[in-house]
Image (tube, helix red, strand yellow):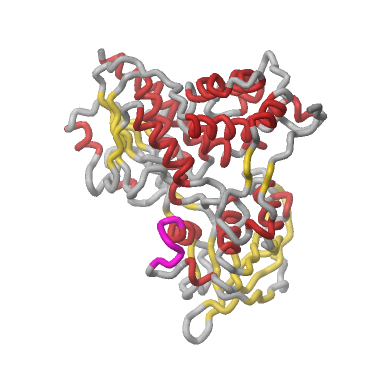
Amino acid sequence: MAIDKTKRVPVHEQSPDVRAHNFKEVRQGYTLEEAMLEASRCLGCKKPLCKEGCPNRNNIPEFIAELKIGNVEGAYKYLAERTSLPGVCGRVCDQPHQCEGKCVRGVKGDPVSIGMLERFVADMASKEGYDAVETAAPNGHKVAVVGAGPAGLACAYNLALDGCDVTIYEAQHEAGGVLRYGIPEYRLPKETVVAYEVRNVTRIGVKIVTDCPIGKSLTIDDLFAQGFEAVFLGVGAWSPKYMGVPGEDAEGVFTSDKFLSTYLFGDVANDDGVPNCVANRRVVVVGGGNVAMDVARTAVRLGAKVQIVYRRGEAELPARLDEIEHAKEEGVTFNLLTNPTKILKNDDGFVRGVELVRMELGEPDESGRRRPHAIEGSNFVLECDAVIMALGTGVDPNIAEATRGLEIDDRNRIIIRNEDGLTSREGVYAGGDDVTGPETVVLAMGAGRRSAKAIMEYLKSKE
């Protein structure tokens, strides 16, 4: 089957009118023939910029070269050398701004679909049960990892490959962090992808202790007293952000983490009724990032009519382009260049609308995006029944108490000495959202991998 090498092999998707009413995965992925055709588009560059664009430095050209000749198991072995979560990364990484954004094919056409190829290989590994990794002989060193999200899993995985005895302590009931509790099923299946890849980490000897929050069930001092020689902190950023506008205390105002975790924890009908409140209701989602798209698209699937409110224009939306397009296709409307000034309540305290002000863009701010300014006298009311704040999250302010003895900045983030994650305390490393604030999955994984390497060097220096 001949293909135009400047164009990607199309990916099968559920149609918008169907997927807007279910939580099945939107993209169906490649067949083996399609994956091999897409892999054949790779130029095999001598200097692979795609690899430089990956924060985890995955073996991208190597796994694609194996896939070109149909050696899926060989492709998986190259991926498994660097990442414990290929099925996750293939689905939720920001490839357009990372590996695919550097692909030379993208200069005069579509970049290679690196994410879809990674996903295909990972899914085949799950289906066929490939056993791709070999661990080093036990080296006698014990390391504790706090947090079973992307950073903690990556750190633990790499340490175990080097022969360390690793235990992860996780505050939640299940391992996975944001992968388990923050990303909807239609983007990232929990059992077939997240749970499977967590099991891959435990298969190489990593132990995971759940329901064990740092600072409450144990402290860093406790971990050292138990014989651990080093500790890695990857506790994430779970503290919700608010706008601080009048009326945010109204019934029917929720944060994105509350809304998504309530749905993902169980059956749409939890005691507090967060997801139920959106069924057949008018919902306003405030924000323009990937979380805002996740919230909006989840609310649509629960029967809501959804509008996104964002203070900048479409060109400045920080969400992935495909997530924005999927949201539009599923019926989400966008109120751009508008910003809430007040949330309006009924006499019984429930939301009845949002007062918005129109915005205009000025000079770029520190993020490089044009700074929005309110247009005086342009206020108007958008009627709605619920408001979900999707403004991102911050590091829990209790982290300072939980990690006494470490330096913390004014935004509650752990201060590290270098990119390896060394903190102000010997033997304690940190990486991921608790250091940078909310970032992408693969950036957290890259931080965990770098800290694992630094921890190994530290342990060897003690020998």
Quarter of the N terminus within the rendering: top right
Q: Is residue 392 visible?
A: yes
- 173 above or below 455? below
Residue 8: percent from the left, percent from the top? 75, 34
Residue 162: percent from the left, percent from the top? 36, 19
Residue 43: percent from the left, percent from the top? 73, 19
Residue 282: percent from the left, percent from the top? 61, 72
Q: Is residue 256 left or right of residue 319?
A: left
Q: Is residue 122 left or right of residue 216?
A: right
Please state the extent of the stretch shown in magenta in the rendering: 264-270
Q: Is residue 3 left or right of residue 270?
A: right
Is residue 393 in the magenta section? no
In front here: 440 or 259? 259
In front here: 96 or 114? 114
Q: Residue at x 48, y 36 (%)?
A: 444
Q: Which quadrant of the view contains residue 286?
A: bottom right
Q: Residue at x 50, y 45 (%)?
A: 438
